[in-house]
């Protein structure tokens, strides 16, 4: 819908843009709304639940990252998909300790500590959930995994595993080869399986 508004402001709107603004087409994909959505008394901006979810996931501004994390946490509970560590539980435990006790607790948990003293000090003084797990793109944004991708392309990674994946991505991009065909196919299959799981889960509700 934002694109339709922008096109109208620049005088480049199309019939599809106008249909979106008139409430006749989906505010996310611009497909025609189903007849039931056009009946009197019905207020609907999206043609399907999936489009509504995609809009919420991709909403810009300060709430975008929070929305993604909240929905991913509801599915995976803050447990790393790579190493299996319950990063959310670890954060909860560390946060409950006094700062002098936190370092020993992290060492005992075999947690990879930050590389710089400043980052380590901040972690010990004020641990945040984002210091323990991240919402990771299975197919990286830089390799085509952004845009209209939904939760099926996201996974929970603890911060150390996320850093490993980030370093791998930087190496691929620096070498200019991007993701290999083999790795891309592996990740695509992973997102296909997750997509099927999400679809089946929604069908039960």
Image: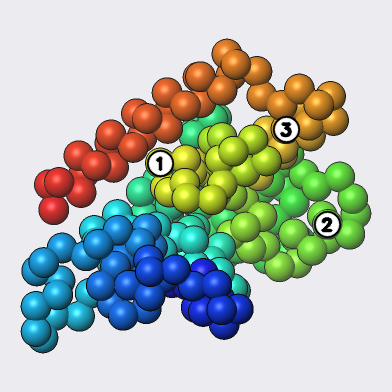
Q: In the picture shown, does residue 180 fall above or below 30? A: above
- Closer-to-camera residue (27/8): 8
Q: Residue at x 9, y 84 (%)?
A: 40
Circle 2 residue: 119
Q: CA distance from mark 3 to mark 2?
A: 23 Å
**N-terminal label among 1 and 2:** 2
Percent of width and height locating residue 62: 60, 74
Q: Residue at x 38, y 69 (%)?
A: 15
Q: Residues within 10 Å of mark 3 (few under 14, many from 20)?
A: some
Element under disc 2: helix
**N-terminal label among 3 and 2:** 2
Circle 3 residue: 169
When asked about the image quadrant of residue 131, the answer is bottom right
When asked about the image quadrant of residue 125, the answer is bottom right
Q: Nearer the viewer, mark 1 or mark 2?
A: 1
Q: Residue at x 67, y 41 (%)?
A: 142
Percent of width and height locating residue 33: 21, 65
Circle 1 residue: 152
**N-terminal label among 1 and 3:** 1
When asked about the image quadrant of residue 171, the answer is top right
């Amino acid at each position: 819908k934002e694109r339709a508004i922008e096109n109208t402001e620049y005088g480049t709107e199309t019939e599809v843009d106008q249909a979106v603004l008139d409430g006749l087409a989906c505010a996310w994909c611009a497909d025609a709304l189903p007849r039931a959505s056009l009946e009197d008394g019905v207020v609907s901006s999206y043609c399907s639940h999936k489009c509504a979810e995609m809009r919420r996931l991709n909403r810009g501004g300060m709430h975008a990252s929070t929305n993604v994390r909240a929905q991913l946490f509801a599915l995976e509970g803050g447990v790393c998909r790579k190493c299996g560590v319950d990063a959310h539980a670890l954060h909860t435990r560390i946060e409950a300790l006094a700062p002098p006790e936190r370092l020993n607790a992290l060492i005992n948990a075999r947690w990879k500590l930050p590389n710089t003293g400043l980052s380590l000090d901040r972690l010990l003084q004020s641990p945040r959930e984002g210091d323990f797990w991240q919402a990771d793109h299975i197919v990286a944004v830089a390799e085509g995994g952004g845009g209209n991708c939904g939760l099926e392309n996201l996974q929970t990674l603890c911060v150390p595993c996320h850093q490993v994946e980030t370093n791998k991505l930087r190496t691929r991009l620096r070498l200019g080869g991007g993701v290999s065909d083999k790795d891309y196919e592996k990740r695509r299959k992973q997102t296909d399986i997750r997509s099927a799981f999400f679809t089946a889960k929604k069908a039960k509700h």
